[in-house]
Image (cartoon, rainbow, N blue to C red):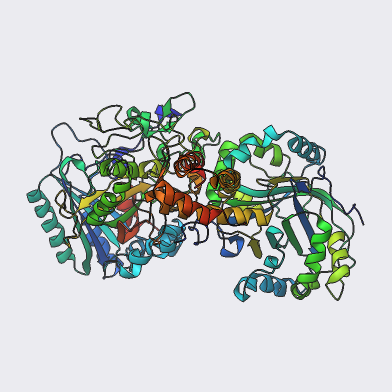
Amino acid sequence: MAASVRMDLGDIQGDILRAYGNDYDCTTYAFMKIECPPEQARAWFTGVVDHVTTAAPWPPGEKPLTTLNVSVTARGLRALGVSEEVVGSFSREFRDGMSSRSALLGDVGPSDPKSWEPGLGSGDAHILLTINAQRTSDHERALGKMKAAMDAAGGLRIVYQADTELLPGSREHFGYADGFAQPAIEGTSDDKARGGGVPLKDGEWRALAPGEFILGYPDEDTRVDPKKRLPNAPAAPLGRSGTYMVWRKLYQDVALWRRVMRDAAKLYEGGDEHTLSAKVVGRWTNGAPLVKYPDKAPASFDPQTPGGNDFRYDKDKDGMRCPLGAHIRRSNPRDALGFEGHLSFRHRMIRRGMPYGKVLPEGVTADDGEDRGLVFVSFQASISRQFEGVQVQWLNAGNIFGLGHDKDFLLGDPHGTGKMTIPGKPPFFLSPQEVFVRTRGGEYLFVPGMTALAALADGTAG
Amino acid sequence: MSVQTSSPGPITATGTQPRNHDGQVIAITVFSTIKLPGRLFLPVLFQVTRRVPKLTATLRELSFIHFARWCVIGKLPYNGPPQKKGRFRYPHMYFESNFNGGWEEYIDAFSHILTSGMTAFWGTSYGFPKPLPTAPFKRYIQDNETEADHYYCAYPDATSTMIQRALELDEKLAALRRDAKRMQPDAFAAAYRAFLTDAQNAL
Amino acid sequence: MRRTRSSTVASPNVSGQAYAFMAMTPVRPGEEKPLADYLRGLRDRGPSPLAKLPRTHIGRFVIVPDFHHDPTWKQRREEHLDLNYLIFTSNFDGDLDSYLDELCERLAPEAKEIWGRCVGCPESAKGAALKRYLEHNQIKTGMFFAAYGQATVGAVKSSLRQRDKLIEFAIRAQAMEPDALQKAFLSEFDAVR
């Protein structure tokens, strides 16, 4: 099949296939609860849908000052009047919601949904509006408009709002360049296939089938189907051009991370905490991958330049360069699991994370009480296969990598024990594992296509 | 501090009911109805596969499975009424596996990686839809699968890979234990480092 | 009896020293639900009865109500099971004969609730009578795959424990000087296994 897939970009919401993070500095996520009858909610929704940004390319020089995107939870679909039968055509995990999957996801202990922030995981979040803006002033104006429309409609309430802003140099709070390693998708980002697609045996790569990320298109399974069946999707018209969205607010304990790395490094290579931290992550802070630069970070490295993300693990099977348990190697193993990528190619997702909160100044190792971290967003055709598969089998368990029960050292769920092996001669062991990242709340959502949004607004979605 | 197997392992046995897994290990139990050619072909296939280790090399390399078995059943032992006596019209194949990971990941791996093996073992079963694409194949397995009413593993928190590496580790450690007492501290420290270097993928 | 008691290496039931046993017995009509309830409830009442057979690596009980049939298949005649069948399989160490002896003795209380609900099971559901019943209903294995068929349950468990111990030691020992390292190693690992 290959490059013959044409995506109906005008029917797909923006920000899924292309990151707005590069164009927009501020993002607000506003979760609403519908407290009025479906007809009244749909009247408001119709007004919202008119302003939704699609994936259609902007004419040169006409980049909008702000963008708007909409997604819904299973309860949101019901609140808009969608029938149980149609809601039942959505995936099980979406209908059950993220908080019901907490044991599976490792959202236990301090990440337990019982202690999530109010409005998240409680069933109150129905609709998520995502607003991107180039400048703070545009941002405030867009938010004002949104609130005015809500007040005019009545029966709607914002139950949770997260305001996020890019940090200098596209870093996340632990200090690492983030968000540039994305799956290459046929018909959209074929040029990013090297490093972003499926690693083939001959050293080549190929882009992933679009149906892995957008419903209504062939996926990695059906691309080889002579009968051209399409992957499972919700009932028409909701199943076309839509995708599932995972939204998580992850608190990062930056001071704890720095202290643990500083103290652990006392026994590691003469106290080199930067190398030790890089071994945990799999990249240097500027984003340079350890597998290519094992000894020290290159003075200048821009992960966005062509080839910046083009690497494999085939020359590093024992993890001497990049540990087998390094965060980036676990969350996207590329060729590391062998078998021509066949154990990993169905577990890719589009990530659109945005940091929130103020940076903890460099060198500070005492917690300042500020709330900071990452709003993790991913888009995928199947939450259970893609997001949960990665979370459960790759991050919270180590078996597939031959790492026993070792969890991802950066994110793995908190058990108070655990370790990470830094391969070497001899190896170094990081232990015990601390809780650097805590889940503060989250939702499973669905991002309808434009036709589907119109049907939801009209009450004709079934 | 107990770090590994003695603490409960992670939740990995997804896609199945609680009674159909024990800790990290999932049961799969599948019957399929065999067409006439399979009656002749399968016993030969079993014989050959047992005798040529190369044929199961990929299965071993995947390292998901603890134990698996195939049985072709043409007739059930008779135990008196109300059981009916006699042969089946078609032979039936019983398959069981005891594996780690999630149900969906397991089937995906088999469809994509052991494609020809799947076809060899199930190609003579009625309704077998080919291993690829995986969606109809998964439906076929689901339709033919019966979940266990009771399932037991003596070491539920261990995975097959972990066990195989722990067994290798045993041998390596035995050598160091044998020599440790006779060595000078510096020589021992060097031997210990060499042992860790050699054994690190088992830890 | 359909087969010889002792298994040889060439037996398809055997891989390494591991044995694959399977018995498939008809469930007495009316006993399907009580049997399922009993088996499904075992976990709530304590450890699995199979834990009383320390040679057992992995075992299962499955009640199969029928063969699956799909009208779209090009199968000339549908075939159904006459009754529900109970499948018991075990992957265990060593020979079948002594394993069944152990099973029929140690699992006597449970066996009455399990095979006691099956057609043709002797009333006592224990000892030599139960053993004969299970042997009679054995299904021969066509092919058996064992990832570590050379290792007994005891060997598996002890190597896992040793791995745990070694990980714990390796973490603790990172800060040790050679002298202390050797002493700690000897005190941890020199004891008899």
Percent from the top left, x then y, of residue C9?
81, 44
Give the residue displayed 28% in from the left and 53% down from the top. Answer: A260
Residue A320, relative to residue B150: is it above or below? above
Q: Nearer the viewer, residue A355 or A58?
A: A355
Task: Work out which residue is located at the far left of the displayed protein and give it.
Answer: A137
- Whether residue A395 is visible here, answered yes or no, is no
Name the residue at the right extreme.
C1
Q: Position of residue B195 (x, y in %)?
A: 50, 41
Judge by depth and name the residue closer to the eye, A41 or C97.
C97
Q: Is residue C15 left or right of residue A237?
A: right
List x then y, in percent, for residue C183: 47, 53
Whether residue A137 sits left or right of residue A60 in the image: it is: left
* Snapshot quadrant of residue B37: top right
Is residue C153 visible from the viewing direction of this image?
yes
The residue at the point 35 percent across, 47 percent down is: A379
Residue A197 in the figure: left or right of residue A19? right
Q: Nearer the viewer, residue A89 or A205?
A: A205
- Does C170 appear above or below C64? above
Which residue is pictured at 50% across the width and 62% down the height?
Answer: B8
Q: Quadrant of residue B36?
A: top right
Q: Quadrant of the C terminus of chain A?
A: bottom left
Q: Count the labels in the image.
A: 0
Where residue C83 appears, x then y in whole percent?
79, 64
Q: Is residue B92 above or below residue B37?
A: below
